[in-house]
Amino acid sequence: MDPTRRAMIDGRWSPSRRDATSARVDASNRISKSTRQRPTKTAQNAVKYLTEEEQSRKFVADEDKFVLKQSKKKADIRVREGRAKPIDRLAFNLRYIDDERDVFDDDGGDLDIQLDAPESIVQGLTSAQLQELESDISSYHVLETERRNRQYWEALRTVCVDLKTKIDTNIRDGRVVNSVVDDIDRILRPKSYDQLEALERQIKAKLRSDENIDTDYWEQLLRHLFVWKSKATLTRIYDEIKEKRADMLRTRGQVAGQKEGPAAVSNVAAPALSTQTTQVVGNEDVSNVTNALYDREAARGVSENEEIFAAEEQVPAGSEPQWKDTYKARKPRYFNRVQMGYEWNKYNQTHYDHDNPPPKVVQGYKFNIFYPELIDKTKAPTYKIIREHGRRRGESFAAAGEDDTCLIRFIAGPPYEDIAFRIVDREWDYSAKRDRGFKSSFEKGILQLHFQFKKIFYRK
């Protein structure tokens, strides 16, 4: 007999006795209901929908944060390499008070880069440059989430729109000076931000009242008040930036002093703080007028196909100028650019493509040399080309695949010394076709010489 059946007959594994009339317990079915009700299918779908929406918003926010971070990083790189546009310099200034900035993106030499006020950066730009800057500012303003940063960009956009409006109005009206606007600016200029806000409330109350007032005047005053409020906001934020940068400079000086020992502490902070002023190199012209011209030209920035050019050479020896005993000689300042690009000749078309381009070559130069304090302003500075070793124009001593070089010497009267640069010796394009950009002028103390080289086309 089966052992299990035998055990049941003997009563060893027999089930416990129960009342036949009692409820039968079924393990697969629960008698009592759960105290926590399960959500309905509609509720589950609603929760799932909201979760997906939140995830979508988070994804967009993370993407915007990444784009903003990359834009700031690119701006920093262009500033460090000396090819910054105005928008890059404005973004670089904001880095000192940006709470969301990654410290690992900083560079050791960032503190030595000159800090410029936001208003000075946008001053002197053309209408087209202001239009481009306004578009770039709007991009930053849309991506920013921090309140102070948004105020910074919004104030800058207001100032750019005001400057662009003034330029367009001057061009349209023949640069007629509006005395009313001058009076308004004279009233608003000395007021602080709080005073401007109080005045704004008074003007709005006056416009809402039933008084017999000059509505056009008060509305114009209100429009200009918004601009001056933006300028006051920029001033306040720029003061915070300068204070934060000064703290960082002091901290760097203290750290350097601790590394070098107690004897060197008193001499550490001075070189760091001196970077805020213009550094004098030899007898270089560092007058206020020259610095203003230099800052205005530097504010124009460097385009994608340009680089800063400072290949200065020693001026060939010759007779000293007769005025050297009368005036103290100065070395003129300059802000030059070299234009780089690709030459798609037959060889490069055969061996390269747009994904793997050939090496860039020099395509032209833009010289901007500042002579604001010439003694004889009736004689404009000039230039001449100097070729060494007796080489004449059109002759070449360079090896195959290389370009000859020459010196270009800029000559001015007292009190400025001559200055020379080494450039590629190729034929210039003097035409104005398709904005080739040839320019040779002396105006408002700036000698401008812009030229590109002729393109050579080979035929079979």
Image (cartoon, grey):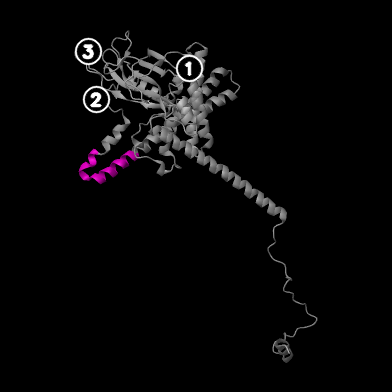
| Label 2 neighbour load within 10 Å: few <14, some 14-19, many 20+ | few
Outermost residue to the top: 378
Left or right: 274 with respect to 443?
Answer: left
Residue 105 position within the rendered picture, expressed as x and y whole percent measured from the top left: 41, 41
Tell me where residue 85 sits by quadrant. top left
Task: Answer with the quarter of the image where residue 358 lies.
Answer: top left
**Residue occupied by mark 3:** 321
Which residue is painted at 33% across and 14% down in the image? 393
Task: List the single residue furthest toward the left.
Answer: 325
Q: Magenta stretch: dominant SS?
A: helix
Question: Which element type, helix, strand or loop, lies under badge 3?
Answer: loop
Q: Which mark is residue 333?
A: none
Question: Contact (CB < 8 A) between labels 2 and 3?
Answer: no
Q: Dividing the image into 4 quarters, which one contains the N terminus?
A: bottom right
Q: Residue at x 26, y 35 (%)?
A: 270
Disc 3 residue type (three-letter): Pro
Front residue of 413 and 204: 413
Amino acid tagged 1: Asp
Residue tagged by mark 1? 435
* Residue furthest bottom as drawn: 10
Q: Is residue 398 above or below residue 379?
A: below
**Quick check: can you spot residue 262?**
yes
* Circle nearer the viewer, 1 or 3: 1
Mark nearer the N terminus (1 vs 3): 3
Residue 344 magenta-highlighted: no
Q: Which residue is mark 2?
A: 282
Return the residue nearer the eye: 313 or 206.
313
Give x and y (percent) for residue 264: 22, 42
> 124 and 451: which one is in front?
451
